[in-house]
Image (tube, rainbow, N blue to C red):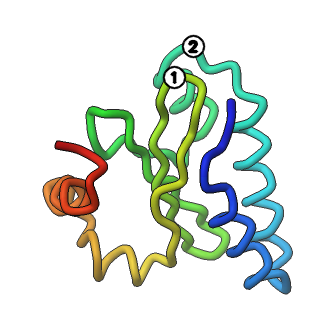
Amino acid sequence: MEIIRKDKLLKLKKKKQGNVKLVKAIDKLINDIENSEWKDKSDLLKSRPDADRVHPDDFFFFDINVHRTMILILFKEQEAEIIWVGNHSEYDNIFKGNKHTIETWLRNYGKIK
């Protein structure tokens, strides 16, 4: 599977290069996505228990617990687009842990209609 906007993850890795556990967790996420053979989204959820489907259009938040990093990814066919990356505090401020707020944000940024 191809990762679109992978640069967002690579930027986070560079910024947090001293946090070896986080860097390894990001590398694992990239590897899991690029080498995935997920037939459907339930396969994704089984192999990545840190994933949470936050919208029916296949938007998922990944909670990288090592550094309380949150990553919003859209999965479409054989592509995974990195939509948003931030820490848990930023996630709480923007999305408020609420699927309705996430949907509104996605609509405001033109990701859904």
In the displayed structure, would residue 16 be above or below residue 7? below
**Mark 1 or mark 2, which has the lower sequence index?**
2
Residue sticking out furthest to the top: 39
Where residue 9 sits in the image (x, y, percent)?
67, 64
User: Helix or strand or loop: what does disc 1 sit on?
Assistant: loop
Where residue 83 sits in the image (x, y, percent)?
46, 57
State left or right for residue 67 relative to residue 112. right
In three-dimensional space, the C-alpha distance between marks 1 and 2, rounded to whole angstroms, equals 10 Å
Q: Badge 2: how crowded within 10 Å, few (<14), some, or many (20+)? A: few
Where residue 85 sits in the image (x, y, percent)?
52, 68
Q: Mark 2 points at which residue?
A: 39
Where residue 25 sits in the image (x, y, percent)?
75, 59
Q: Badge 1: how crowded within 10 Å, few (<14), some, or many (20+)? A: few
Instruction: Name the residue type under label 2.
Output: Lys
Q: Say which residue appears at 37% left-offset and 74% top-offset.
A: 91
In the displayed structure, would residue 47 be above or below residue 99? above
Q: Say which residue appears at 54% left-offset and 54% top-offset.
A: 82
Residue sticking out furthest to the front: 110
Of the pair 15 and 7, the residue shown nearer to us = 7
Q: Say which residue appears at 68% left-offset and 36% top-offset.
A: 2
Q: Name the residue under label 1.
A: 77
Q: Quadrant of residue 59?
A: top left
